[in-house]
Structures are given as C-alpha cells and as structure tokens.
Amino acid sequence: MYRFLAKMTNRAVVFAPLRYLYLMNSARNVLPILAGLLLWVGAAPKPPVLLRVHLQAPEGAKGQVSVPVTLFNPAETISIQSLPEVTEKEIRKVSTREDGTILVEFTDFGQTKLEVGTSTGRGLIMVVIVNGRVVYAPRIDTVLTNGCLLLPAGSVSAEEMAQMNGDVEHSKEQKLKDIPRSG
C-alpha cells in the first residue's frame, strides 16, 4: 500500500509542472478571445437617450402609482405619476434655437398626448426628465397644442440631441423596412 502512495506522490510531482504548462498554454489561447470579447462589448451601441415628460401626481389621488422627485428651482420634493405622458418614442426632432434653448418636436401621437396631459394637468407641475435627471419643471398654465416643448438652454447636451435625432432616423428606417411591399 505504501508503494502505491509513493507512486502516486511521484506522479503528482511529475504531472504538476505538466498540468501548469497545459493551463498556461490554454490561457494563451483564451486570452485573445477574451480581449476580442471586451472590444466587442465596448463597441456595443449606446443605450437610447431617455426623455420622459411626467405630470405631478395630484394630492391625495387614490389608485395612482407615484414616484418622489426632487426639483432644484425651487428646491422641493414632489410626487410625479410613474407613467409618463410623453416619451422619447414620440419625438420627431430635437434642435437648438438661436437663443440656445432646446426645441423638442413630437410626432402627431406625441402632440395629442402632450395636449391631453397639459389640459388635464393645469396648475400641476410638468417634469421633464432626461436620462434620469430633472431638466425642466414648469407649472402648467396653458395647454400645449403645437406638439413642441421648449427646454432651457444647456438642459440637453449636444451628444444627447444627436443621439435622439439618430434614434428617430433609425426608427424611421426600421419602419420603412417593415412596410410590406407589393409586387
């Protein structure tokens, strides 16, 4: 029995360096694959820019799900409805005006949703959130019927604007591809 253990110990001593060399050789083969995988993940498309327009949740509203949001000017915390009135999916175009303000133009569907939201939410605060940050929070005093929203200068970066406009164009191209062709 001791001879068997002695043979096993010798084998372990002999095979340990071979096992080490095998693992190192495998690591050399796997390393380029891991590097390629990291580059592929880094080249993944950026997530879309999220632009959401929410209305303030009315005081004591029953059955509505609301979320607290902190505003900066004036500094206060209010509750907003968790479901947005308008989202980035209803954007037609985002542009900068001469005075630096940001003009967000919505599709016909977005225009209708914005009009309904501002007519039913008079006196409440409309909160515009871009990528999780509050960029604008005016009190609703008029119904927005033209399908446009004017945001303060600097509230949306040039990169975010370009990405939103690119997402709109990509969405249009995708819709054109999905239209069945007769022929």
Image (spheres, helix red, strand yellow):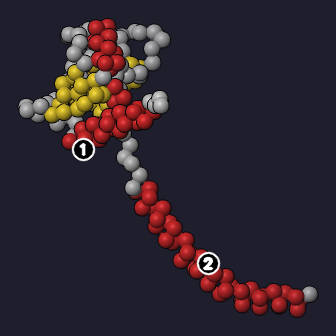
Number of residues whose C-alpha sits closer than 10 Å to that of mark 2, classed few (under 14), some (14–19) or many (20 or more): few
* Separation of residues labelled 1 and 2 (CA atoms): 45 Å
Residue 32 % position (x, y): 49, 71
Residue to which mark 2 is pinned: 23
Q: In which quarter of the image is residue 92?
A: top left
Question: At 46% across and 65% down in the image, what residue appears?
Answer: 36
Task: Compare residues 152 and 163 and report the one nearer the observer.
Answer: 163
Residue 102 % position (x, y): 17, 31
Question: At 32% across and 14% down in the image, what residue appears?
Answer: 112
Q: In this view, does 14 lie above or below 162?
A: below
Which residue, as the protein is rendered here, is positioned at the far left? 99
Q: In this view, does 34 lie above or below 79?
A: below
Closer to the N terminus: mark 1 or mark 2? Answer: 2
**What SS does tag 2 mark?**
helix
Question: What amino acid type should be assigned to the residue bearing mark 2?
Answer: Leu
From the viewer's perspective, tell me whether residue 5 is left or right of residue 45: right
Q: Is residue 1 above or below residue 112?
A: below
